[in-house]
Image (spheres, rainbow, N blue to C red):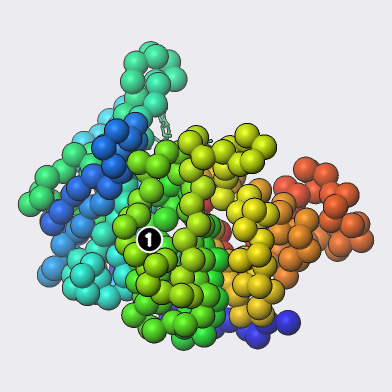
Amino acid sequence: MIREIEYPDVEINVVRAKEPVEATILENYIATAAGSPNFIRHITFDLRNTPLEGKFVAGQSIGVIPEGVDEKGKPHKVRLYSVSSPSKGENGEAHLVSTTVKRVIDEHWETQEIYTGTCSNYISSLKPGSKVKVTGPSGKRFILPKNPQEYNYLFFAAGTGVAPFRGMVMDLMDAGSTNDIALIFGCPYRTDLLYKSYFEDLNTKIPNFHYLKSVSREEPRGDGSKYYVQYQLIDNRELIEPILKKDNTIIYVCGLKGMETGIYQILAQQGYLDYLRVSDDLLTKDPSTWSWDDIKTLKPSDRMHVEVY
Ligand code: FAD
Ligand code: A2P
């Protein structure tokens, strides 16, 4: 049985949506490679001289309030973006906080015209020097524990879900972690491997860091199906199983809503019930006989954190 995991006390809601503060955009550059159909940007906010300076830790989110009003004439609501900088701030500067933002582009429900998500497109278009209304920090559970170097980690990310793990991995490198850290990252195309050179470099240089990529639309599994992050639990079992078996391993899942279910399913099939909260009723049945409806009742245990949106 794992000992109780302690988490640091972090500040939340220092700045609320009713009274946002102004940050300045320091940098805003495309993070997807040429030819990608997706537009994902690395955006750094300068929070100097605001109460938010030095307040964010990796895993928390920053709120952004887009300019203008919605269809009903009301001011836009705040949207959250995971911080992708380390807890010390981007480049170690406490007043700099970065995010990783994907432009939401869809077809309008009624008009069939192109629908561009309000906030993601608003901030993605801001140039360095622009002012933006921000709030936060938000979130106190999706963070690294106290003494983070004492644990092993399995980080599952889909798309911009990699944002908090960039910051967390930087924190772990800073803490001199020699325990296992596996980042399992899923994206549609090879052009969308966010922060690829940083993670590939670590993979080469740091023996305890493992970078596994699941490129869903270009690198199918052996059976021709889409490669989703959860299938790495099966296809890379040799690497992952010894990590899962350690009693000081924590799983973090971030990204697309629904991605957690596939991870729960395979963990249950492989017998890793420590990471899950399973109802007493379900515990009486062999996991291999669980139906999809059974799987959907699973929740993460204290050893797994899930942030999906
Ligand atoms: P909105 O305009 O709010 O639209 C939201 C959704 O509704 C879109 O999918 C859009 O397609 C659909 N929609 C709305 N109206 C219509 C319409 N008329 N016709 C068709 N479709 C419509 N996002 C990131 O990019 N990076 C992150 O790191 C990140 N972290 C997050 C962390 C947390 C804790 C949470 C809760 C969310 C996070 N998000 C992140 C998501 C982010 O908060 C926004 O939800 C996202 O950017 C979309 O906001 P938007 O204003 O651009 O879209
Ligand atoms: P796909 O879209 O090919 O089905 P992004 O947010 O940038 O689109 O990336 C999300 C990634 O997660 C994509 O590769 C997407 O694959 C994949 N994905 C979609 N559905 C799931 C799911 N249920 N579980 C895990 N990954 C998923």
Check the picture and name the quadrant holding the N terminus: bottom right
Q: Residue at x 37, y 60 (%)?
A: 200
**Neighbour tally class for label 1: few under 14, some 14-19, many 20 plus, Cα within 10 Å:** some
Above or below, 207 relative to 201: below
Q: Report x, y in % for residue 307.
A: 51, 56
Residue 17 visible in image: no
Residue 158 visible in image: yes
Above or below, 115 relative to 46: above
Q: Residue at x 52, y 85 (%)?
A: 150
Specify whether 255 is left or right of 68.
Answer: right
Q: Report x, y in % for residue 248.
A: 61, 80
The front one of 151 and 101 is: 151
Above or below, 53 relative to 32: below
The front one of 292 and 136 is: 292
Q: Report x, y in % for residue 58.
A: 37, 68
Name the outermost residue toward the right.
284
Secondary structure, mark 1, is helix
Q: Residue at x 50, y 57 (%)?
A: 212
Q: Is mark 1 within 8 Å of ligand 2?
A: no
Q: Residue at x 64, y 53 (%)?
A: 235
Specify whether 255 is left or right of 121.
Answer: right
Name the outermost residue toward the top.
111
Specify whether 263 is left or right of 213.
Answer: right
Q: What residue sits right under mark 1 in the picture?
A: 200
